[in-house]
Amino acid sequence: MSENPEKKLYLLDAFALIFRSYYAFINNPLINSKGMNVSAITGFVNTMHDLMKRENPTHFAVVFDTSDATTERAQEFSFYKANRQKTPEDIMQSIPIIKDIVDAFNIPRLELGGFEADDIIGTIAKQKEKEGYKVYMVTPDKDFAQLVSENIFMYKPGRKGKPAEILGVPEILEKWEIDRPEQVIDILGMWGDAVDNIPGIPGIGEKTAKKLVKQYGSMEGLFENVDQLKGKQKENVENFKEQGLISKQLATIILNVPVEVSNEDLLICDPDKEKLSAIFAELEFRTVGKRILGEDYSVNVVEKGQQLDIFATNTVAGSVGATEVVSGKNLDNTEHKYKLVQSLDEISSLVETLAKQKQFAFDTETTGLDPIEAELVGMSFSFEEGKGYYVPCTEDFNETRTLVSYFIDLFEDESILKIGQNIKYDIKVLHKYGVYNCCPVFDTMLAHYVIEPGRKNSMDYLAETYLGYTTKSIESLIGKKGKGQKTMRDVPVEDVKEYASEDADITLQLFNHFKPLVTKHGMDELYNDIEIPLVNILADMECEGVNLDSAYLSEFSKELEKDIFDSKKQIREISGVEFNLDSPKQLGEVLFTKMEIPYKGKKTKTGQFSTNEDTMQKLVKEHPIAKHIMDYRGLTKLKSTYVDALPNLVSKRTGRLHTTFNQTLVPTGRLSSLNPNLQNIPIRTERGRQVRKAFIPRDENHVFIAADYSQVELRLVAALSEDKTMMEAFKNNEDIHTKTAAKVFGVEESEVSREMRSNAKVVNFGIIYGVSAFGLSQQTTLSRTESKEIIEAYFATYPGIKKYMDDNQEFARKHGYVKTIKGRKRYLKDINSQNAIVRGHAERNAINSPVQGSAADLVKVAMINIYNELNKRNLKTKMTLQVHDELIFDAPKAELDEVKILIKEKMEDAIKLSVPVIAEVGVGNNWLEAH
């Protein structure tokens, strides 16, 4: 057979790649402004385009499973694929669009009634191999391994930054431990397939199937030598012979499908860019569109009534949470007037004009992304759509501070609304130049967040989605990241004027679009009374920063180095071998091959043993080495992520550590922090808690006050569910975990052991996160049966909680969202999904989002009330950190007694509940001591 390297045919298994793409984003789906889940489409298009670009195929086809007839296998064996979950609606809505995209790429799209994609791919692969092609079957499906030959390969696309994997005969033989690829069918027949409901032979899993095929050559060989087997295995092989042969038949890919496709049809052609552009625009594919169609591509909003036919029937029916998209406007070519304001007369005139406005939008241009370190390059303003003004600043700090002083009265004028996109950044920049009270404000990013939590909030996204306008990219001015990237200071002022004025102009237009929507969606109180007041508070906290004891961390790092060395030594003594502990591959081989610890998990995509945290957690009960490995990993992460890293993040300008609090990241309303992420400092281990010692007051005349809500989520559960038993426990100041343990274990409270209380604590906190019997057994010493009984006893003890959970899910099914005590909404578009996995994820969110979100509301209200009271009394105490339900203050010792009472009162009175809200207040010379 001749081999022609120019003839490379790639056959894509469409459904396998569609499902893989969809589930890759299951925890953070890609949703466009219409409420449509585009995860599957995005992943599929990226995979297909990347493959075409990287591998340069000469021939190509995308193969779909049949949609209009029952396959031969299903006709003959009714149980085949009978237990499969119903395909998620989002995938069903995506398939017709994906098919149109494939057509627009001018790629053959193959499907044939009565046959599966596997069979079509197998038939074509074998046909084209004979014609001298190298054939690549693009799929993650293991079944295709049976087809691999000298010129037929499996091509498994890369994931999460990992390269694609090409499997030829040597790789298949090694992976499956066989002599020839066809033996994969025998392994699959014995092993079975739960997904396709192929039964296999009971008692034979992957490992045993490989062993038996290696020993007897095939399933038929096994049956011929059944007398060599023993016990239950022999019994199963004898009793389930027919089932095994049927399973092998079902696992065999058909190679004589009556499919006809010419070599000319399979040739790679140029795509229809006009069709692709229209589809991508409707999907709101910006990055993908530009990458495939070039920099000239831009997303324009389609006029109402003019959307493409494929979307008229396939957009999400009744989608919740989608904001209105402006219609009929393409602003890319809209005329605008952007003016450079430089002379003193021009600045005075601009200030005078702005002072007459009820509101104006503004933006700052700086030398970098860190507002604490960045220098001001210029300011832009807009108070009328299509018009903007740019005021450049000099490199001299004092000159710029003088220039900014002309605008201070405007920024601090409480009769003029200041509008920004991520306005907290601009407030922090201006703080360095003497603007200390920028209010009132309106943040377009925050407005979109309260309307559509969980969606993108960048200006580029909002402008293209809601205004049909593609903004000028920052990279077009300063270049892409890397050594050659410039700062805005290096860009000609005329170019900066256009860019900066556009930002202010677009921000004003977004304000005009979002302000009425905040009211329409019932978010006025949440937005105006909680989120907006918090902007200036967080800006103050971030500018204030916190004092860090770097010398202490340096010494602590040395201690951790010794702990890590000792931990390594213990692991190597137990394992009896020297190896690289940081290599998952080597670790897996040591644990599960050399030490022969039973492996109960699934192997990774590359065929390696998994050694992730879940695997180690399961092994803790099996072997003591697992605990040592987890300790080692905890120590190394603690050292690298916090102990060694934190001192490098201390500002050179202020000498303090400045985190950034993100208001728009977490859909439940909780704050997150970054650079550094202080929310994730470990507190469950003694060593982890020691990091908090490094956070210290500003000097010897100050102390730390740490105020923490006690069991706030459980108290909220009691209040929201109105469960009488739990409410009474909190009203009577009882230990809720001891009370729960006594009830579910059927003992007196005096007889509750430490282990009982610990297990009850896991149930108390886990129940609102939908903990299952299996999950509970993994987190406690309980068996799965015991865990099931405990959960049943829990709901019998607290029936109001079970009713609350059921009611919340029913509310979500009816309305498409759940809400917090302050009206914050969490949209759950999958709550009515026919797919149990997808629906289950939404059902768990329906239960825990109102609790988490209400806790976030409570903390935020407390922060606002405390901040306002501190200012009202002219106290010098500063709120410096917020971590989950805890607030940390840097207080002068002279104010300590007054401030402790103030903080406790404001936290406990923030939102009145039907159960007591308790705040515990501690004092110390560092965070750990205060906590």
Image: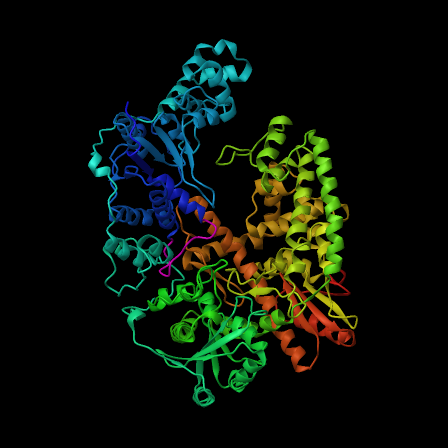
Q: Is residue 862 visible?
A: no
State the residue at coordinates (68%, 39%): 627
Residue 921, position as x, y percentages in the image: 73, 66
Q: Is residue 771 magenta?
A: no
Residue range of the region highlighted in magenta in the rendering: 26-37
Which of the colour schemes (rainbow, by chain, secondary structure, one colour) is used? rainbow
Residue 808, position as x, y percentages in the image: 49, 56
Count up the numbered dots.
0
Is 615 placed left or right of 699 in the picture? Answer: left
Q: Main secondary structure of the magenta part?
A: loop
Is 596 placed left or right of 261 in the picture? Answer: right
Viewer-side residue, 435 vs 391? 391
State the residue at coordinates (40%, 45%): 21
Q: Quadrant of residue 20?
A: top left
Quarter the N terminus occupies = top left
Q: Is 277 above or below relative to 341? A: above
Is 812 placed left or right of 80 in the picture? Answer: right
Quarter the C terminus occupies = bottom right
Q: Quadrant of residue 579?
A: top right
State the residue at coordinates (49%, 71%): 489
Is 29 placed left or right of 884 in the picture? Answer: left
Viewer-side residue, 544 vs 135? 135
Q: Is residue 143 visible?
A: yes
Q: Is 385 above or below relative to 11? A: below
Q: Is residue 30 magenta?
A: yes
Viewer-side residue, 55 vs 19? 55
Q: Is 603 above or below relative to 419? A: above
Residue 179, position as x, y percentages in the image: 44, 19
Residue 640, position as x, y percentages in the image: 65, 51
